[in-house]
């Protein structure tokens, strides 16, 4: 799913099915599948956005359910933020995900996932 706050265009999150508390609650194939899905989502966001790279993060401190943040990073970021942690951005000032505006991005990610 795309993040509600698009502080960097294409910011997405991956949720497991079924929901578990942490990555450590998954074992064997389920754990490998989640991590593979995270990398595949990152590949798709990278292809769809033309980003420089993807940052990945899993915390679970505020929301105690496993989820992975997939954050595209761009050459066009302000120098002070370009090497900072993605959480340095002002998420409240960022554009919100908009189904109409972001439809092309959604389709590009979907196509990259289907072809990857």
Image (spheres, helix red, strand yellow):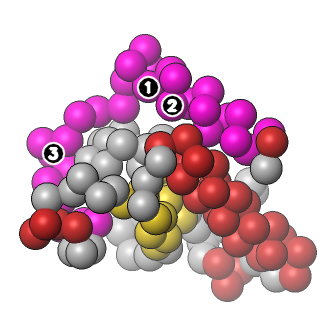
Report x, y in % for residue 29. Answer: 89, 75
Name the residue carrying label 2. Answer: 105
* Mark earlier in primary sequence (3, 1): 3
Position in image of residue 44 (x %, y %): 63, 49
Query: How would you rate the neighbour count of disc 3 (Cα within 10 Å): few for under 14, some for 14-19, many for 20 or more?
Result: few
Q: Is residue 63 visible?
A: yes
Instruction: Identify the residue at horizontal 81%, vertical 67% (top origin).
Output: 33
What is the secondary structure assignment of the residue under circle 2? Answer: helix
Compare residues 110 and 21 and report the one nearer the observer: 110
Label 1, secondary structure: give it. loop
Q: Badge 1 is on which residue?
A: 102
Q: Is residue 111 left or right of residue 28?
A: left
The image shows residue 12, relative to residue 75, as above or below, that is above
Q: Which region of the structure is painted magenta?
A: 86-114
Disc 2 and disc 1 in contact, CB within 8 angstroms = yes
Q: Are marks 3 and 1 in contact (CB under 8 Å)?
A: no
Q: How many residues crowd mark 1 within 10 Å: few (<14), some (14–19), many (20+)?
A: some
Q: Secondary structure at mark 3?
A: helix
Residue shown at the point (71%, 80%) measured from the top left: 25
Which of label 3 and label 2 is nearer to you?
2
Residue where numbered disc 3 is placed: 92
Identified at 65% across, 78% down, the residue is: 23
Nearest the eye: 24 or 94: 94
Between discs 3 and 2, the one toward the N terminus? 3
The quadrant holding residue 37 is: bottom right
Image height of 11 relative to 81, above or below: above
Q: Nearer the viewer, residue 55 or 49?
A: 49
């Amino acid at each position: 799913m795309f993040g509600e706050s698009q502080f960097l265009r294409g910011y997405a999150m991956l949720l497991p099915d079924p929901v578990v508390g942490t990555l450590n609650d998954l074992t064997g194939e389920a754990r490998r599948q989640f991590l593979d899905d995270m990398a595949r989502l990152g590949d798709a966001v990278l292809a769809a956005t033309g980003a420089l790279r993807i940052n990945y993060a899993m915390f679970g401190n505020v929301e105690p359910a496993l989820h992975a943040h997939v954050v595209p990073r761009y050459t066009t970021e302000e120098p002070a933020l370009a090497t900072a942690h993605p959480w340095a951005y002002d998420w409240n000032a960022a554009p919100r995900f908009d189904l109409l505006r972001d439809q092309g991005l959604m389709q590009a990610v979907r196509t990259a996932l289907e072809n990857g």
